[in-house]
Image: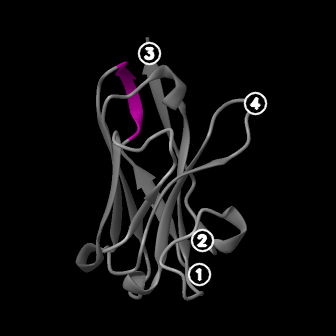
Amino acid sequence: QVQLVESGGGLVQAGGSLRLSCVASSRTFSSYIMGWFRQAPGAECEFVAAISRGGGSTDYADSVKGRFTISRDNAKNTSFLQMNSLKPEDTAVYYCAGRRSGSASYSRLEPQYDYWGQGTQVTVSS
C-alpha cells in the first residue's frame, strides 16, 4: 500500500504564496501520474493540477492556471504544488493523489487515482 503525505499548508494573506509537498512511500513513484485536488467547505472535490510520470507534461484547472505550478522530483519521491498570487477562493483542503495505471499522461478524474493523501489545509485571508 502506497502512502502519500502532504505538508506545507497554512494561513496566508491574499496575494501570498505557499508550496505544498507530497511525499510517497513507494519506490516506484516515478511510475505514478500525480495530481492535486482540493475541497472547500460545502463544496465538491475539484481538480487542481496533474503531472505526467516523467514530469514533462502538466495540466491545470482554469482557476489556477498561471498562478500554480505542479512539479515532481522522482529521486525524492515527491510532488510539489507551488501556489502564488493566492486568493481567498483558494481556501480548501488540498489533497495529492497518485495514479498507478493507464497510458494517459495525466488525469483530471478522481476515480482514476489509486492513492490519496490525508490532505493539508490552505487558508487564504482577504
Residue 92, given in percent of the width and then of the height, sits at 56, 34
**Residue on which the image places disc 1:** 1
Measured along the vertical axis of the image, is residue 102 above or below residue 76?
below
Q: Is residue 122 above or below residue 111?
A: above
Sequence-wise, the earlier of marks 4 and 3 is 4
**Label 4: which residue?**
42
The kind of residue on which mark 1 rests is Gln
Identify the residue at horizontal 33%, vertical 80% (top origin).
Answer: 54
The colouring scheme, among rainbow, by chain, secondary structure or one colour, is: one colour
Q: Earlier in the sequence, mark 3 or mark 1?
A: 1
Kind of residue sitting beneath label 2: Tyr
The answer for how far apart the CA atoms under marks 4 and 3 are is 18 Å
The answer for how far apart the CA atoms under marks 3 and 1 are is 37 Å
Q: Which residue is mark 3?
A: 125
Q: CA distance from mark 1 to mark 4?
A: 30 Å
What is the magenta segment's predominant secondary structure? strand
Which dot, 3 or 1, sits closer to the camera?
Answer: 3
User: Element type at marker 2?
Assistant: strand
Q: Which mark is residue 96?
A: none
On the image, the x and y values in percent for residue 108 come to: 60, 62
- Residue visible at 41% across and 44% down in the picture: 65
Say how many tags the image has.
4
Quick one: label 1 or label 4, which is nearer the N terminus? 1
Bounds of the magenta segment = 9-14
Q: Name the residue that disc number 2 marks.
A: 115
Judge depth for marks 4 and 2 and give the one in front: 4
Depth check, front residue: 54 or 66: 66
Residue type at mark 3 is: Ser
